[in-house]
Amino acid sequence: MLQVISLLLENKAGALMRVTGLLSQRGYNIESLTVARTLDPEVSRMTIAVEVDSTLRQQVIKQMNKLINVLQATDLSESPSVFRELLLVRVRMPQETRAAVLKEAEIFGGRVVDSSTEGFAIEVTGAPEKLNEFVDVMRSYGEIDVTRSGVVAIGLEPKKLKLQAPVPTKAGAKAEETIH
Amino acid sequence: MSTSLMSGARMLLECLSREGVDCMFGYPGGVTLPFYDALYDHHIRHVLVRHEENAAFAAEGYARSTGKVGVCCATSGPGATNLTTGLVDAMMDSIPIVALTGQVSTKLIGSDAFQEADTFGITRSCTKHNYLVKHLEELPAIIHEAFYVAASGRPGPVLVDIPKDVFQAQGHYQHVSSIHLPGYKVFTEGHTGQVRRAVQLIKKSERPLVYAGGGIVAANAASELRQFVELIGAPAVTTLMGLGSLPSHHPNFISMPGMHGSYAANMAMSGADLLIALGVRFDDRVTGRLAAFAPHAKVIHVDIDPAEIGKNRAPDVPIVGDVKHVLGKLNEQLTDKAPADESLEAARRAWWHQIRTWKEEHPLQPVTSDTEIKPQHLMAEIDRLSNGQAIVASDVGQHQMWAAQLIRFNEPRLWLNSGGLGSMGFGLPAALGAQFARPDKLVFAICGDGGFQMSIPELATIASYGLPVKIIVMNNGYLGMVRQWQELFYNNRLSAVTLDCFPDVEKLAGAYGFKGRTVDKPWELASALEAAVKEPGPYLLNVKVSPLECVYPMVPAGGAINEMVLGPPQPVAG
């Protein structure tokens, strides 16, 4: 089944490679992956959808958490959360169906971002399944090109981020007492 | 606090000094020239090996035999790629090593420069963590972090890739007072509630079995393990990686389980009603067919790595923590003797009786012959000379299994072997590293004739440093373990396993300036081994053993561990 993982990771060189490498190394198929900075520019939020056997879901999270640059890995598949995806579609259709296409876009809450004699470019956001339906509908009107962002997700339950305090080096200096 | 202006190379040595490094294994090259120049008049001892892979194995030998972080060093490109087998080996067996590699100058990275390789990318999956140092200012923090990450939690290899211009840049060593890795959680204390549940299970168990592994060695928890085993009075098996964590002569010790484990150990696993798994990972070579493994047992699983808990076998009581701490807590709670429960004590006595019966039915015992040297005979003789005290670094294959079955160890960190990765060519360089770490110890390198030939270059290192390593080649003229599988499972179609050319060891060792000898008569074996041990310097003993001997017991791949093949098929009478 599809597992959606929300990951907070340090913005360090190679951090993204560690995550994707881990997934391929352990044989998990990446369905989609998005990554961007959070409010803290040192930290990125990643949303990964992986195709994985349900018995392995815990293992994926544990392996992610072992990565030193990963601050938190959360399985959002079964906790209250919102999934959204952005879709851009370029649809080419005959003149007589333009109005109908616009109507469909409206139903899906889409927005026309480009219009030409050949057709439209439309932007839609929504739950991934909703976007699948929209793609099917557009396909019925003509030739389409689609780009999808991959799912982004946010958990609705507050989850405390537990960070590790600094550890004194062998030299024996006192650790700062900061716990974030 | 900062020091005078120094080069990056000098700063690296400053960091290594502060980490207590006294010895490192390496091989120089173009981009590490500045480092080797700084090393020229530095107190850290650099051991020049003859191949970078062996630098990593030697660092592992150093680490495995002491518990300290081993250090190896290689140049960019081929130097770094040659290290990778050793890195994966250390990863699989959770061995703390720090690998330092040179890289082409930062401005050349990505230009396919001479001897450039993407070491950072290549070693991502070979290491617990890795770094590419882009600026000199980062160097001290990264090096200290690298040592901390390598040694803490579940230990493992860490690689630091350092470009040539970083070695050459000038800067001040800034004292690093703390390491801040906000996402790196080291679990130490086990959960108190789970520990209490474990105690309850232990107190109720009729057929408990302790299943201890490399985690005990890594955590230096041998004395806690011994106390635990004695407190609960349970039989104990130790895995290939855990040999020595309970002394082999301990009355509760019933040897190694698994594919080539003893009959008693495997039957005990299958019969136990409680498995107390300590620092183990339920490896396939131990469990056999997982679905049939320890079918009657509840499982208490203690491990420092949360990802190991439930990975292969779902435990009834999971305890994430340092096994030394957890055993300490368990021992505290187990000291108060519960009032004797007659029926439970009777069940425990019956369990012990059963264990002894299994041990007597099919003991692991040396096979001998009047005409040829049996491999088991060789291991028994090494065992006699070691008397539980020598360091035995083994290569990979049949000899490794016979050595594990028949050589006894009084303490941990004496048995060094490539358990998880099974890297041929490990034994000799690991012995070399261990001998540097523990110069007073008798060190055996036990190799097959296959693995030995992967390690021949290091004879030069051994000779050049005058290391008194006793190299014992168990020579059966075959890649024996592969041959065994071809015999048993591929209709004896022996494909690419015949090693029909082997050097004259007397000449070979002689060419390096030390003694070598071949022995093939069983009555000469003991004295030949004694002479090797008495020799103050290195010694190469080539022992010709019966070529077609197979390792038994054996659990065929995919079999349940209580379905062992105990010996060669018997000829049908008539």
Image (cartoon, coloured by chain):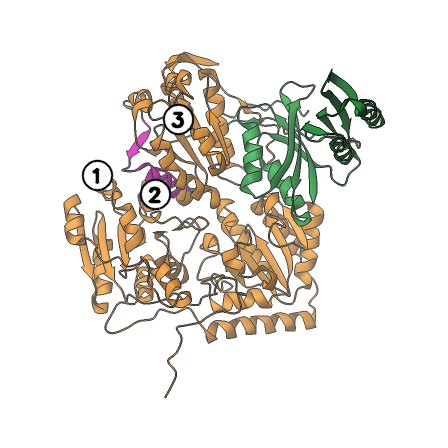
Instruction: Estimate how packed mark 2 is, as few (under 14), some (14 to 19) or many (20 or more) residues with alpha carbons within 10 Å.
Output: some
Q: Is residue B275 visible?
A: yes
Instruction: Estimate how packed mark 1 is, as few (under 14), some (14 to 19) or many (20 or more) residues with alpha carbons within 10 Å.
Output: some
B290 displayed left or right of B242: right
- Badge 2 element: loop
Q: Position of residue A129 (x, y in %)?
A: 76, 36
N-terminal of the pair, mark 2 or mark 3, is 3
Q: Position of residue B417 (x, y in %)?
A: 40, 50
The residue drawn where x is 60% and y is 57% is B276
In the picture, residue B375 is in which quadrant?
Answer: bottom left
Q: Specify the amino acid type for callout 2.
A: Arg
Vertical relation: B507 (above or below) A63: below
Res. B464 mark = 1
Q: Which chain is orange?
A: B
Q: Are marks 2 and 3 on the same chain?
A: yes
Q: Specify the amino acid type for callout 3.
A: Ser
Vertical relation: B25 (above or below) B355: above
Res. B438 mark = 2
- Chain assignment, label 2: B
Q: Which chain is green?
A: A
Res. B17 mark = 3
Quadrant including the C terminus of chain B:
bottom left
Towards the viewer: B109 or B230: B109
N-terminal of the pair, mark 1 or mark 3, is 3
Q: Which residues are magenta?
A: B43-63
In the picture, residue A145 is in which quadrant?
Answer: top right
Q: Position of residue B571 (x, y in %)?
A: 37, 80
